[in-house]
Image: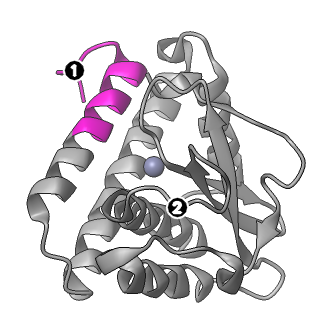
């Protein structure tokens, strides 16, 4: 389930960073990672900059690797890293995660979701039974996840990313987890 992520809050973890402080993964995905980080940073607006965070995820039952935190005066893109805030995870996973989070950031900067809706989504994440949230909020939340995946797909394609199989598998798994968590069924939408 997506709802059981626990993040370590130890010193040095979760500090906000600019794009230049973000350690890219080694290997063939380093360049794509930095291109995606540039696109995310480019969404910064006056009075609402976009920062990065890396958080050590502990006790997680799933391989969820990122999140977007939307506040009145700033946006954070958070990468969850299992082995340390500056120890990148798998290159392809981190690139797909950044592309997906870019989708959320654009939903915010392009006005597809409001700060209030975003807070509602975070509240749903914190519920023991997400199906108890209002039907409208759950539908909005799933629509937002689908929108972020659509942006991820088009941005990665434009940047020359070719591993559609891995992308489709991660998108399918993530959306299925959301559908199941929000609607209590893998079939509902
Ligand atoms: Zn998402």
Q: Is the residue marked 1 within 8 Å of ligand 1, measured from its CB?
A: no
Q: Give the percent coordinates (x, y) of residue 5.
A: 59, 29
Q: Dot 2: few (<14), some (14–19), or many (≥20) neighbours within 10 Å?
A: some
Residue farthest along the left direction in this orientation = 165
Quadrant where the image shows the C terminus: top left
Q: Looking at the image, which is closer to me, 47 or 68? A: 68
Tell me residue 22's x, y (percent): 64, 75
Q: Is residue 102 above or below residue 31?
A: above
Residue 74: x and y, percent? 79, 69
Write down the quadrant of residue 1 in the picture. top left
Q: Is residue 7 left or right of residue 182?
A: right
Q: Which numbered disc flags the more N-terminal residue, 2 or 1?
A: 2
The stretch drawn in magenta includes residue 103: no
* 3 vs 58, nearest the viewer: 58
- Asked where in the image residue 159 lies, by quadrant, the reply is bottom left
Q: Residue at x 56, y 19 (%)?
A: 133
Compared to 124, does 39 lie above or below? below
**Region of the chain picked out in magenta, as a range:** 173-189
- Tag 2 residue: 88
Residue 181 at x, y = what percent? 40, 21
Main secondary structure found in the magenta portion:
helix
Residue in the image at 55% along x and 79% along y = 40
CA separation in Å, label 2 and label 1: 31 Å
Local crowd size for mark 1, using a 10 Å CA cut-off: few (<14), some (14–19), many (≥20): some
Left/right of residue 84 with respect to residue 141 in the rendered view: right
């Amino acid at each position: 389930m997506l709802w059981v992520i626990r993040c370590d809050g130890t010193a040095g973890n979760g500090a906000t960073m600019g794009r230049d402080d973000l350690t890219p993964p080694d290997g063939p995905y380093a360049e794509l990672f930095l291109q995606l980080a540039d696109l995310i940073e480019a969404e910064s607006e006056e009075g609402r900059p976009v920062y990065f965070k890396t958080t050590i995820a502990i006790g997680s039952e799933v391989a969820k690797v990122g999140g977007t935190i939307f506040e009145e005066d700033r946006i954070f893109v958070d990468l969850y890293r299992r082995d340390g805030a500056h120890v990148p995870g798998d290159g392809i996973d981190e690139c797909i995660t950044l592309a997906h989070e870019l989708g959320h950031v654009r939903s915010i900067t392009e006005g597809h979701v409001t700060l209030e809706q975003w807070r509602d989504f975070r509240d749903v994440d914190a519920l023991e039974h997400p199906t108890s949230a209002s039907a409208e909020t759950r539908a909005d939340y799933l629509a937002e996840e689908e929108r972020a995946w659509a942006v991820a797909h088009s941005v990665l394609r434009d940047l020359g990313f070719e591993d559609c199989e891995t992308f489709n598998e991660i998108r399918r798994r993530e959306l299925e987890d959301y559908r199941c968590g929000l609607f209590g069924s893998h079939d509902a939408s």
